[in-house]
Amino acid sequence: MHTNPSLESAPNQLPQAGPDLQQIAIVLRERGWIIGVCASAGLLAAGIYTKRLPLMYETLSVLQIEPRGRVLGFELDNTAPSGSEQGVQTILETFRSRALLDRVSTDLNLAENPDFSPVPLSQEQTLNVLRGCIDVRQRRGSQLLDITAHHPNAKITQSLANGVAKAFIQLQLDQRSSGARSVLEFLMTEADRLKKRLKKSEEALQSYKETNQAASLEDRQDTVITTLKSQGNNLATARGTRIRLETDVADMERFTGNTEALLQIVSVAQNPRIATTRAQIADLQSQISTLRLRYTDKHPKLIQTANQLREAEGSLQKLVLQIPATLRAELERAIATELNFEGALKDQEKQALALNRQSIDYKVLARDVDTDRAVYESILRKLKETDVARGVQLSDLRIFESAALPISPSRGSALKFLAIGLFSGGVLGGAAVLGGCLVESAWRSAEEIEAATDLSVLSTVPRLSSRRSGSSILDRMSDPSQPILEAFRSLRTSLHLSARKQGKNCFLFTSAQPDDGKSFCSMGYALTLARQGVKTLLIDADLRSPSLEQSIFNSHSLPGLTEVLEGTLKLADAIIPTSIPGLDFLPAGRILPEASELLTRKGVHATLNSARQRYDCLVLDSAPVHSVSDSLLLAQAVDSVLLVVRYASTPRKAAMRAIHLFQDQGTPVEGIVFNSANPTSMYGYYSGEKAELQH
């Protein structure tokens, strides 16, 4: 059984839950007549107001925004294009400016024109009236501006529309001319300043050239760079020669006295005298080989050639022995040459660095001159453009369509006021309906009930349409085509099937107040149980104001529960079969004002226990909780208590208090039956009929 801890801890606190969008739509549909009444009242008020308004004439003058004019390839204005969003907004604001209104008033002499105002007006009053007669708007998706004028006089209306258009174009031209003069003065001042700055930059550059002889700075840099490269090559060559000689000298010191080994050294082998001597020796050896083929060893020529060979070999050996001293001398010369080239290279590098430093300063001054000259030339060009533009008065606005003389009064204002009245009335009506929905104390959805009570809504029962003649409520509810049966089937599924597992078979239906539909719901629940094959007894336990007997049998005088409890009638004799198989009915019997005293006797428990033995399920319809205490007394003898809450009718506080009363008695409410719900709140599933029973 469901309990609510929050209710036990704070019994006087009522949780609030605002209606959702679905419920708001339902409320608006239910109370749409209120909105209709308010809208009609607003429409009537607007009609009365428009009847009192004077007849107004209305006409339209159209301006077109064109691309900005260009003269000699130069744009006339430096401001943002008028076709842009910002430009159009600026134009619309200009139409409301005092400067434009003053010009229109002066051009049309409105202050002294009796057609404009029958009474004399001051200048400020004239401007205020004129401002109310003019409306300027941009046509959506175009470059057209509609200037609408309205006035009781047709000719004045035409004059205002055309006069505002012409005055605006002239005002724009005057503003541009004034702006061009200001720009021209600024450009002339800026040109003089830049001219002096350019002259100062050129003088500084010339002074630097004269001081540092920088006229041929680039040629000097080229010469120094060429010399620097040449000195670098010479130094590399000298360093290579020195390294080679150092290696050869070290090898000679290692091979001292070894002629053959010394001849393998490059510096020795490349010595001119040694090379010549070795060539001579090779030639003599070749001659000896040839002569031996012709002559014997004793031949004079062969002997002479052999002597020459021995002399050449001796000379070679002497030369080889003398070469170390020669190489050392060459090494010293190579070292000296390398040092000389290193010094010359460093001197050239210093000259190059100095020239680079001069070049940096020179380029800075030259760049200043070029920049000042470019800016000065740009200002001169702009000065000429502005001078040309000042002499050509072109506007990017032209009159696309002049205002025509209106023939008949305009009804646009009347229609506008009527629409405003209708809309305002509808909005006020809707606000009143929604406000009432927010502050009303009744629930409109199962979600609101569950959020406030923490009890499950076991079923949502829709409304029934009006009764059909010749049929009782029970007969109509038993009709298989009746959609409301599905709601009671849901209640049977939610309650009876789970209750059977717990051994519960006696259910009490009650409500917080009368007319919430407890009798209807108890009868519907009993009907669905019987249709399922459950042998069911429906008991009318409302001994003060019974209604089931009238609804089922159209009778008021049948004996029933009262007589059974008093002992004057047996239970079996009081039970009456109904037209529904498996469903029997126990009427309330004689109405007793002192029913609570009768119910306090132990006979109620005995009667219900006796009925339990004969029936599978007992369904009791009891009195409202807050009207009498009968339901609280009967709750002690039943298995489950069901509270019926009527859609948009049962006060929340009354329902919450009834729940607390049952909790205090130790018989908490099993669940809620949400009765007589709006079919639209059930997403259009049900479309039944409305019963005459308070359902």
Image (cartoon, rainbow, N blue to C red):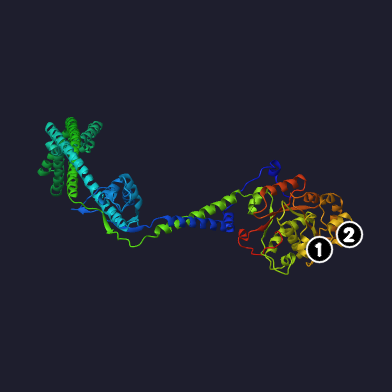
- Relative to 648, 241 lies left or right: left
Most extreme residue toward the bottom is 470
Tag 2: amino acid: Lys
Residue at numbered disc 2: 570
- Relative to 398, 523 lies left or right: right
Under tag 2, what secondary structure? loop
Residue at numbered disc 1: 584
Dot 1: few (<14), some (14–19), or many (≥20) neighbours within 10 Å? many
Residue 305 in view here: yes
Tag 1: amino acid: Asp
Most extreme residue toward the front is 119
Q: Nearer the viewer, residue 79 or 173?
A: 173
The numbered disc on residue 307 is: none
Residue 95 location, x and y as percent?
Answer: 31, 50
- Relative to 30, 71 lies left or right: left
Residue at (82% x, 54% y) in the render: 592
Q: Are marks 1 and 2 in contact (CB under 8 Å)?
A: no
Residue 310 in view here: no
Residue 675 location, x and y as percent?
Answer: 68, 57
Residue 117 location, x and y as percent?
Answer: 32, 51
Q: Toward which corner of the image does residue 229 lie, by quadrant?
A: top left
The CA distance from mark 1 to mark 2 is 15 Å
Dot 2: few (<14), some (14–19), or many (≥20) neighbours within 10 Å? some
Q: Toward which corner of the image does residue 380 lie, by quadrant?
A: top left
